Image (cartoon, rainbow, N blue to C red):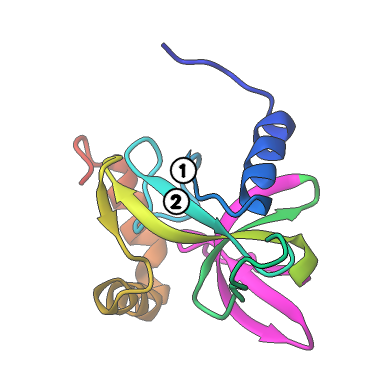
Amino acid sequence: MEMIVDNDAFFGCVLELLKEGKEVTIPVKGGSMLPLIREGKDTVVLEGVEGGTPEGMPVRRVKPYDIVLFRLNGKYIVHRILSEEDGVFAIQGDGVLRNVEYCPPDNIFGRVKLILRNGNRPVDPGSGKMMRLWRFWMWLKPLRRYVLAAYKRLPCRP
């Protein structure tokens, strides 16, 4: 049975759990992280980050190439950090071709600790294999538009 929950209420609960030091598993919506994170197939496990964890919890700082949960213009988004300059993070979805978002650290609430392939097989997004895949995907930048279009048209996507 599918249940529709208000986005602000849902993420309000997610943020509270992250502040308590708990890991939170959420479904992926949208195609902005294609092809490495897939809507309807993958879920992500979030952990709290600096500023979002209670006293005594280990501090997890975010860094370039981390996939993070952040809020921008009233929306909660999961994208990858590209760089940091003067305390502001440049963030972009792997499947986004042009737009880069700029986000202060106060608007970053969680870091993707694991991607659960098909909801159950854990994949470390920072592993050597995943980073090689991501770098190859970035290298394909001139062709990504066509690769994504073809991928979205596949009858049975991997």
Q: Where does the image place residue 69, in percent across and percent down from the top left?
A: 61, 56
Most extreme residue toward the front, as rendered?
56
Query: CA gap, disc 1 to disc 2?
Result: 4 Å
**At x 41% / y 61%, what residue is drawn?**
145
Q: Tag 2 or tag 1, which sits nearer the N-term?
A: 1
* Viewer-nearest residue: 132 or 5: 5
How many circles with numbers are drawn on the protein?
2
Q: Amino acid at mark 2?
A: Val
Tag of residue 146: none
**At x 79% / y 65%, what residue is drawn?**
106
Q: Residues within 10 Å of mark 2 (few under 14, many from 20)?
A: some
Residue 125 magenta:
no
Which residue position holds label 2? 45
Prevalent SS, magenta region: strand
Most extreme residue toward the bottom, as rendered?
86
Residue 90 magenta:
yes
Q: Amino acid at mark 1?
A: Thr
Which residue position holds label 1? 25
**At x 41% / y 75%, what residue is drawn?**
142
Judged left or right of residue 48, residue 54 is right
**At x 68% / y 46%, what residue is drawn?**
15
